[in-house]
Amino acid sequence: MRRNLAFILLIFILLGCEKVIDLDLEFTEKRIVVDAKINKRINSKNGFAQVTLSNTTSYFEEEINFIENAEVVIKEIETSVEYKLNFSKENQYYIEIENILKSSDYELNIYHENNHYQSKNILRSSPPIGDVKQGIRKSLNDDEIEIVTSFKDIENDDNYYLFEFGKGNLQPADDIYIEGNNFTFLYFINKNKIQNNELEIKMEGIDFQYFKFIIQIIIQTNTQNGPFAAPPTSIKGNIYCVNNDSLNPFGYFNVSEYDTFTLKDININ
């Protein structure tokens, strides 16, 4: 009887110690997110400008709040020619540009809700992709396959590159140990990200600041520390708000050459 009474008292104590914790998840800081680029394929004069704008959302919001009513203008500094980008059905501001100049800075200007956002960058060169093939090495994850990519580094310069395997699978690289030489590296990709047994690989020349920016994005989007980990730090890009520096947006304006390679007949079994 005494043992049963002790057990009942323990239950009441535990219930009495229960405390409801209210988490303050109210979203107050509203910024815009900018994904802006000018791309020119290697060995071509023509290219395009593409800008995606959205508003930051609360932690539990899944839908992207795209901005459709901004004015987006690209200015070629050397010639003073301006390109006004048009909003498309793909939730992007877009325009094709003839004769993109390697010698000119390009200035991005975004006007939205009485704010002016601006950035400036210059074209970074890219070498061609030498070769891409499926590797034979096995990953610790049975759902991954090896992709082997080769290229020759541009000589006499500090170069930084960004590879994209399919959509959103990013791999930055630099030439600190391969100056001017041929280089081959390995990348493992999940089989579920390969459609119709084909994979498009894109290589861009980028600057050092964008190289660091991409590394931080990869680190923070791949964190697996759970909901009680320290919140990710703000990633500083190269775009600022001209009239209010407390409203500097998240994102980057990249101007680069690129090359692509489509790897076909991939064995995913």
Image (cartoon, rainbow, N blue to C red):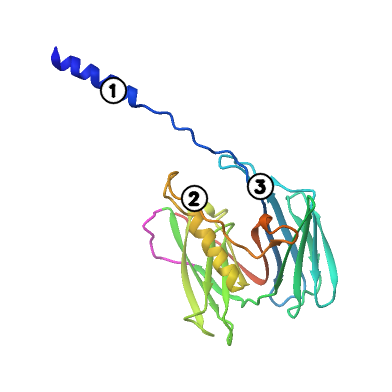
Give residue 210's quadrant in the image: bottom right
* Residue type, mark 1 in image: Ile
Q: Is residue 81 visible?
A: yes
Question: Which residue is rendered at x = 73% and y = 50% of the image?
Answer: 91
Provide the residue designation for mark 1. Answer: 13
Give residue 21's quadrant in the image: top left
Mark 2 secondary-structure assignment: loop
* Residue type, mark 3 in image: Lys
Give residue 206's quadrant in the image: bottom right
Using the image, tell me which numbered label, if any, was put on residue 107. Answer: none
Q: What separation in Å lies between label 1 and label 3 (alpha carbons)? A: 44 Å
- Magenta region: which residues? 134-142
Q: In screen coordinates, is 120 left or right of 186?
A: right
As drawn, 139 above or below 161: above
Q: Is residue 266 visible?
A: no
Residue 186 place in picture, x, y as percent: 46, 68
Q: In screen coordinates, is 174 left or right of 9?
A: right
Question: Which residue is rendered at x = 39% and y = 54% of the image?
Answer: 142
Residue 86 place in picture, x, y as percent: 82, 56
Question: Which residue is rendered at x = 74% and y = 61% of the image?
Answer: 242
How crowded is the residue under tag 3: few (<14 C-alpha within 10 Å), some, or many (20+)?
Answer: few
Using the image, tell me which numbered label, if any, was put on residue 30. Answer: 3
Q: In screen coordinates, is 141 left or right of 44?
A: left
As drawn, 181 above or below 6: below
Q: Earlier in the sequence, mark 1 or mark 3?
A: 1
* Residue type, mark 2 in image: Pro
